[in-house]
Amino acid sequence: MTDHAVVVGGTRGLGRVVVERFLARGCAVSVVSRQRPADFPDQPGLKHFSADLERSESFVGLWREIAEAQGPIRYVVLSQRYRGQGDPWAGEIQVGLTASRDLIEGFSGHFAEDGDRAIGVVSSVYAEFVGSSQPVGYHVVKGGLNAMVRHYAATLGRRGIRVNAIMPLTYLKRESRVFYEQNDKLMETYRKLVPLGRLGTAEECADALDFLCSSRASFINGQSLFLDGGVSTVWQEEVAKSFAGL
């Protein structure tokens, strides 16, 4: 039987690259987003399902519909982000936390009965650190997601379903690459900040999720992995001295 992966938020950015990784492995892939984009590929095994994560009642039973259409689920990746125009606090909590809980609990009843099974969650370095570029709700959601990962790793792990997260630093993706690469001052800042001397990419983040959602990671459970080129290993005072030329 063909492995079946579900990617929530899989029509753009990192989510779309994750979809490509699963397809390259020969998986059937179900993609969930608010709307099917005009450039969504039409190919066997790839299906789109519409859901408005800002309204929990709009996606009740989505997990059943997806499992009936493509078969038992082996992997789920949650890569959604609130991009609405309403209250950013309520929107972040609903899309980032409440919908994640609903999706994990809903899909958990439709996983394959045996073999490797896993859930991958896109968190952020802002789960552990504060950045002025993001609102308080974003920080709360990412920290909450890491706690959710640990909770479900402990509870779903008893059923053989692993749950892990990645915590990326800002990374280059198709939608933003040109902006960063044309901003020499910003790129020089990242070259000085990141021990590896560069920004990561959506492809590298997708590779980490591709690994965590595979039998190669069969004993990794409940972890939130920094993907930051080593930034989190350096004490802030040392960063400040470096930027000051001391």
Image (spheres, rainbow, N blue to C red):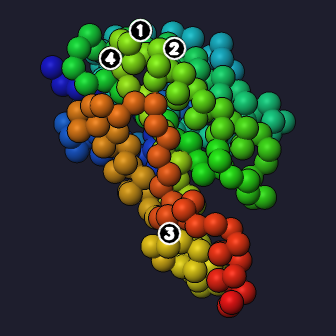
Residue at the disc numbered 4 = 160
Q: Nearer the viewer, mark 4 or mark 2?
A: 4
> Which amino acid, by three-letter code, is at mark 3?
Leu
Whole-angstrom CA distance, mark 4 to mark 2, is 14 Å
Task: Give the number of the disc on residue 199.
Answer: 3
Dot 2 lies on which element? helix
User: In percent of the image, x 50 and y 69: which residue is there?
Assistant: 199
Front residue (pair 234, 209): 234
The amino acid type of the residue labelled 2 equals: Glu
Which residue is denoted by mark 2 in the rendering?
105
Crowdedness near tag 1: few (<14), some (14–19) or many (≥20) residues, C-alpha within 10 Å? some
In-image side of 144 versus 74 (left or right): right
Name which residue lies at 71% across and 77% down: 240
Residue type at mark 1 is Gly
Separation of marks 2 and 1 at Cα, in angstroms:
7 Å
What is the crowding at mark 4: few (fewer than 14 residues within 10 Å), some, or many (at least 20)? some
Q: Residues within 10 Å of mark 3 (few under 14, many from 20)?
A: some
Secondary structure at numbered mark 4? loop
Q: CA distance from mark 3 to mark 4?
A: 35 Å
Residue in the image at 80% along x and 44% along y: 136
Spatial CA span between label 2 and label 3: 34 Å
Query: Which one is earlier in the sequence, the residue at label 1 or at label 3?
Result: 1
Q: Secondary structure at mark 3?
A: loop
List the single residue furthest toward the left.
1
Q: How crowded is the residue under tag 2: few (<14 C-alpha within 10 Å), some, or many (20+)?
A: some
Front residue of 214 and 89: 214
Q: Is residue 89 above or below residue 51?
A: below
Q: Nearer the viewer, mark 3 or mark 4?
A: 4
Determine which residue is flagged by label 1: 109
CA distance separating discs 1 and 3: 38 Å
